[in-house]
Image (cartoon, helix red, strand yellow):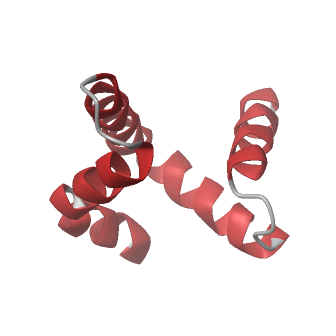
Amino acid sequence: MFKEFILKKVIKSQLKGVPEEQIDQIIAIVEKNPELFKKIGEEIKAKTKAGRSEMAASMEVMRAHQHEIQKALRG
């Protein structure tokens, strides 16, 4: 419960303006496969430390994991 609360606060701070319903969907997906999203986060962080912009790093990593993300969305 506390973990979900913290996760929701972090996601809300990153996704300002996104409807509450969509944030709940994102949280549910992350909870189903936390290791995938942890790996994605670490890869984005590594690429930004290497000099890529956060947006470019995010797009690159998301494309690389596109099939895994789609699989998580289908649940």
Residue appearing at x 71%, y 63% in the figure: 23
Residue 62 x %, y %: 29, 58
Residue 44 x %, y %: 34, 38
Q: Is residue 16 left or right of residue 72?
A: right
Residue appearing at x 34%, y 32% in the figure: 48
**Residue 50's quadrant in the figure?**
top left
**Residue 13's quadrant in the figure?**
top right
Which quadrant does the N terminus fall into? top right
Does 19 sit above or below residue 32? Answer: below
Residue appearing at x 72%, y 63% in the figure: 24
33 or 64: nearer the viewer: 64
Does 42 sit above or below residue 75? Answer: above
Does 6 sit above or below residue 65? Answer: above
Residue appearing at x 68%, y 48% in the figure: 14
62 or 8: nearer the viewer: 62
Q: Is residue 16 left or right of residue 49?
A: right
Residue 74 x %, y %: 38, 77
Which quadrant does the C terminus fall into? bottom left
